[in-house]
Image: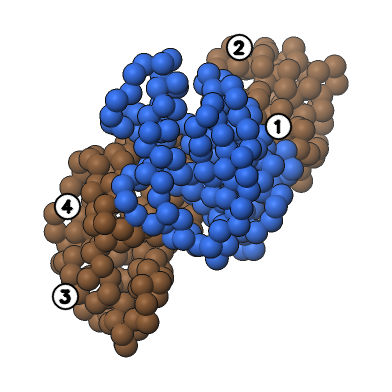
Amino acid sequence: MDVNYINPILSSFANVLPQLGLANVEKKGISLKGKFIESPGVVIIVGIVGDIKGNVIYGITIDDAKKIASAMMMGMPVNEFDELAQSAISELTNMLTANVATNFSNDNIIINISTPTLIHGKFTANAIADKVVCIEMDVNGMTIEVNISMEKNTI
Amino acid sequence: MKKVNVVIVDDSAFQIALLRDILTEGGFNVVGEASSLEETIEVVTNTKPDLVTMDMTIPGTDGFECTREIHKIDSNIKVVVVSSMMDDEIVKKARKTHVSGYAQKPVDAEELTLLINRVMADEELFSELDSLYSSIFKQALLDVINRTTKTVPEITNESNVNVEKNIEGISIIMGVIGKYSGRAIFDMSFETASNLAKALLKRDPKNNDEILNVMSELSNMAAGNACSMINKKNKLFGLRVAPPTTFHGESISISKAELEAIYSAVAKTQFGDLSMSIGFGRGEGEWMSII
């Protein structure tokens, strides 16, 4: 795992979230985790293939996911984490990861991303890499965990 | 598929002759050529091509300005940059200018042909994938189980309905990336997983981690084999599978997919049920280059 994978993610948050009306974006912390990731409630997986392969695994609590979805929908109240809210959160991670891909391309690293898959419930995710870097982002008081499980593609 | 009409924009007569040969041999219809902005506008207006190959360095203008002018005439005309210059900044600008692909000179004939075919691939290609993928994934799953356990599962509950999936046990999710992107999900109960792992390892699994590993590998093989088979049918698909992520727990709800083609089925094995859900969306497809 390369620390150079962190900056493209930080810039992506700084680029994308203000456009969605979420202006206060701050890095809360970076930590190294084992391969197991406990679900905080909602987990979104985006696959990556190209010069780097792996997954970006986003984690959010149901409450924060509802608040973020509400902000994305111009403040429309979101009481249940329903299909519409799930779709908003999937789209958010799609935009964030696509922006990460663009940031990588500025460093001449070309990657393509898959459709996001959103999972909610009580479970543990098991990343393919033995060590996962977790970046905790604070977004208007809500927390989005970004777990990076990526490695250089040697084939 | 109908023959693709191409206009070549290049300031060198030699390059035009070379590209004309490559394109004609590749099965394309070269309908015109241009060496300046004015000629480009004129030729494109008159010939209404499907695609333009664009050089970057043209006296008095550049490939980007020409591309913008072409898109003013018809935004559906695809532009593929064919240039000896290639760096981050140009590629970034090319993407912003809605260029569809990029090939670096000297171009390889076969690669350029493939690139143009991929760019031109449209509705037809998605229907082709739609008609192929479910039977291929089914076959791949059967083959993998058959080869690893020497048993023949039965496929049941085939469906194309897009719904939220609720799972108790283990789920393996893999992103699929290529001309069209999507996902492949395999899931099963702990019991099925543990039985399957035991059969594959020919001993009791040491711990849960080992069971998860076996399931992840099994799913990866099935999805990887299926995507290779699809690519063999038509290499334009260029499908690749992202590494699997495994989930386990008492409640795993996988949200309804925003995908246009969905297929799910259950493989009844003597170890228990294993279900599979595959989906593809049209999306923007990947940026294409042969650099």
Q: What colour has chain A?
A: blue
Tell me which amino acid carries mark 1.
Lys
Secondary element type, mark 4 = strand
Which disc is residue B158 wearing? 4
Front of the two marks 4 and 3: 3
- The residue under label 2 is B72
* Residue depicted at x 45% and y 22%: A72
User: Badge 1: few (under 14), some or many (20 or more) residues near its Cα, within 10 Å?
Assistant: few
Local SS, label 2? helix
Q: Which disc number belongs to residue B270?
A: 3
> On the image, which quarter does residue B23 sit in?
top right
Amino acid type, mark 4: Glu
In the image, is residue B128 above or below residue B100?
below
**Residue B157, percent from left and from top:** 14, 54
The residue lying toward the viewer, choosing from B20 and B263, is B263
Provide the secondary structure element on which disc 1 rests.
Answer: helix
Q: How many marks?
A: 4
Marks 4 and 3, the one that precedes in the sequence: 4
Which of discs 1 and 2 lies nearer the camera? The answer is 1
Question: Which comes before the other along the chain, label 4 or label 2?
Answer: 2
Residue carrying label 1: B92
On the same chain, marks 4 and 3? The answer is yes
Q: Amino acid at mark 2?
A: Lys
Provide the chain ID for the residue under circle 1: B
